[in-house]
Amino acid sequence: MKCKYCGVEIGNSLKCHLCGHKQIGKTTCPVCSKLIYPYQEYCSNCGSPTIYRKDHTIKKVTPDTIVHSEQSHNYNTVSESYDYKKNAYDFKDSFKQLKDLNSMNYKEAFKKFQNQPRKKNIQRKPKQKSFIKTMIILVIFVVFIFIPVSELIINTVTNIVETTDEATSSFDGNGNTDLSSFNLNQDSSRGDYNQNFTNSDGGAFVYQNKLYISLNGQLIKYDAHFENSEVLEESSCDHIYVDDRGCFYENDNDFIFLDFNGKRKTLLNEVSHCYVLDQKIFYIKDETLYCLTIDENMNEIDNKKMVDDTYEFNVDDQNQHILYTNNDYESKLIDFNGTSLKQNVDNYGNAYFIDGFLYYREYDGIYKTDFSSDEGELVQAASDIYRFGVGQDEENEKVIVYGENYDNVLNAYFDDDSYALYDDARDFYIIGDKVIFFTYDDHYTRHYFISSYDGEYAPFEE
């Protein structure tokens, strides 16, 4: 993508690194209205092709295009220069002759007709030789030209179809190891939860070595070795969070609490982007950001309005700040009381907080900032990251940056090197030192995988 102001190539960044111009605008899925990022070929919510699908070209009408319909004929195009006024007089002489002829009586007209010169009766010669010659030429054309060209065209079309079938049938759902080979020995951190919160749908969270994941239209709990599983909800869930009280999740625009005994309680209705932090729940309702405070029994203590015109937000749990974006893609920093701290913050997009730092993507890599200066600190250099997440291997003290590039290849960056994990990942969730991602098959059906940063990955049960 090029900057709309200066024309420099800026990748997928919303801010030009050369002139500072912000590329304002957003695109949504034509089927489900989910936000579509630039160059995203398929909707991450419903799987429908988007306007960035490369094999769907759009033919534009140019000034040289001639439109020959009664309603849309363009008489001012460059290609058409027919002078209707001038050519209208082509019929003048004919109409004059017809008028003169109608003014004559029958005898005068017949006399004038008799005076016309008559054509001689020419006897035509038979064309038998010419017909035989034509047939011979036709046979030669069919045998030596038409048939070979037809075979060439048929073979070419067949090869194109076979190549296309091979290209669209590249889905591999097997993995390179078994699901039981993975061991969940590290719980999700607050940073993992913040990364997963940036996704508009689905979610995954590890608590006490158990995985809670929205999978194939169900909320499922797995044990540490994936030997046993339990269905907690018979519908898909978003923004999953688990602590010692139980499991919190969004379900059909309602925010639900499920304790470990299976008892459910609806905390909020008709809401989105519900974020849990101790006794506070931040959420969006009717494009307004609110903060709900609850007690240990999940009863409401307070529910206050924080700021209007909110499209999305990220929570800094360390400094008790909120970075929110309005519907005009203007970002501002406020505290938990709604007090404005910083106006016109750069719209980083796909950014989230880890330990008091905002991690964000630029054209040349992943940066972090605490807003104390205008310059961020480079975390991982990479020129082609479209979507990212930062994980940590606590046992080996390694920081892993997971990045999905513009070709949907999911890579892991650590120890000054990068490793390709999967070549067609569409979105992912960080869970400790591992990552969960999904992709689509040829029928746009989602398939989920779990992967370690060293390249081993396995599919979940279908």
Image: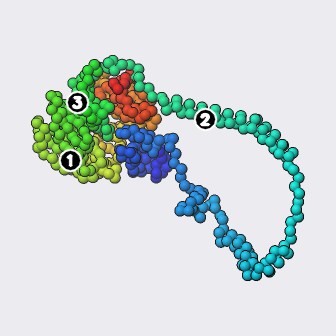
Nearer mark to the viewer, of 1 and 3: 3
- State the CA–CA distance, disc 1 to disc 3: 28 Å
Residue at 39%, 33% (x, y): give it.
Answer: 445
Mark 1 near mark 3, Cβ–Cβ under 8 Å? no
Mark 3 near mark 2, Cβ–Cβ under 8 Å? no
Q: Indicate which disc, 1 or 2, sits on the residue closer to the N terminus.
A: 2
Q: On the image, numbered disc 1 is attached to which residue? A: 290
Q: On the image, numbered disc 2 is attached to which residue? A: 157
Nearer mark to the viewer, of 3 and 2: 2
| Label 2 SS | helix
Query: Is 440 placed left or right of 132 in the picture?
Result: left
Q: Residue furthest top?
A: 181
Question: Could you say which disc has been placed on residue 302 in the image?
Answer: none
Residue at 87%, 55% (x, y): give it.
Answer: 124
Name the foreground residue: 362 vs 282.
282
Residue at 24%, 32% (x, y): give it.
Answer: 233
Q: In the picture, residue 229 is in which quadrant?
A: top left
The relative height of residue 87 versus residue 451 in the rendered view (above or below) is below
